[in-house]
Image (cartoon, rainbow, N blue to C red):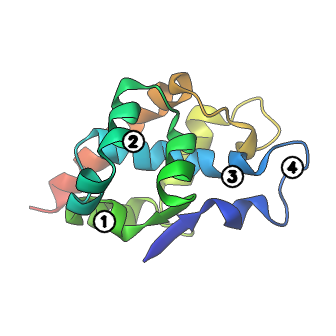
Amino acid sequence: MKYDDASWHSDGDFPTELPAEAGATHIGMYVAWLLLQGMASEELAEDEKEDLQALRERSTTPGLFLLQCSDGKFVDDLISDEANAFTAVYYDLENGQYLEDYEEQLGAEIPSLYHVADTWENFDRLAPVIAQRLAAWQATQS
């Protein structure tokens, strides 16, 4: 299943002054958080050891990692079963809370959410919110 794709965002109503890569930032932040929590699929953990190490070392950014590792596509085979179950609820582009949280944490005083910089500073602002959402979701799974 494909949850999101950077190309979905860089087409159509996308700020012309931004590079297409800006369509991957919100996706990359979320995927990177999951992966840094140890929620990579076995296949990704085995096949992308160097890229995952670069993510852990912060020598690449979340958006760039997504673009390099999966061509900007967020698909279910990147992450573990638990991460997929959480993502189906939290990341859902129509009914989930992720984009609301992303906007609340990172969207103030910028022209659009596509203007959020693909930086570790922004990741660190968003990460505690995702952690809280996962913990709340996990509590409902017992």
Query: The N terminus lies in which quarter of the figure?
Result: bottom left
The disc label shown at residue 23, or none: 3
Measured Cα–Cα span from mark 3 to mark 2 = 20 Å
What amino acid is labelled 1 in the image?
Asn
Q: Earlier in the sequence, mark 2 or mark 4?
A: 4
Q: Earlier in the sequence, mark 1 or mark 4?
A: 4
Residue 83 at x, y = what percent?
A: 28, 59
Query: Which numbered disc, 2 or 4, marks the residue closer to the eye?
Result: 2
Report whether residue 102 is seen.
yes
Q: Secondary structure at mark 1?
A: helix
What amino acid is labelled 4 in the image?
Pro
What amino acid is labelled 2 in the image?
Asp
Report whether residue 40 is seen.
no
Measured Cα–Cα span from mark 1 to mark 3 = 21 Å
Residues packed near mark 3 inside 10 Å, few (<14), some (14 to 19) or many (20 plus):
many
Residues packed near mark 4 inside 10 Å, few (<14), some (14 to 19) or many (20 plus):
some
Pointer 4 residue: 15
* Residue at 62%, 42% in the rendered image: 103
Residue 67 at x, y = what percent?
A: 57, 51
> As drawn, is 95 to the left or to the right of 111?
left
Residue 90 at x, y = what percent?
A: 41, 59
The disc label shown at residue 84, or none: 1
Residue located farthest toward the left when viewing the structure as drawn: 142
Query: Which numbered disc, 3 or 2, marks the residue closer to the eye?
Result: 2
* Residue at 29%, 44% in the rendered image: 49
Q: Earlier in the sequence, mark 1 or mark 2?
A: 2
What amino acid is labelled 3 in the image?
Gly
Q: Earlier in the sequence, mark 1 or mark 3?
A: 3
Query: Which numbered disc, 1 or 3, marks the residue closer to the eye?
Result: 3
Pointer 2 residue: 51
Residue located farthest toward the top when viewing the structure as drawn: 121
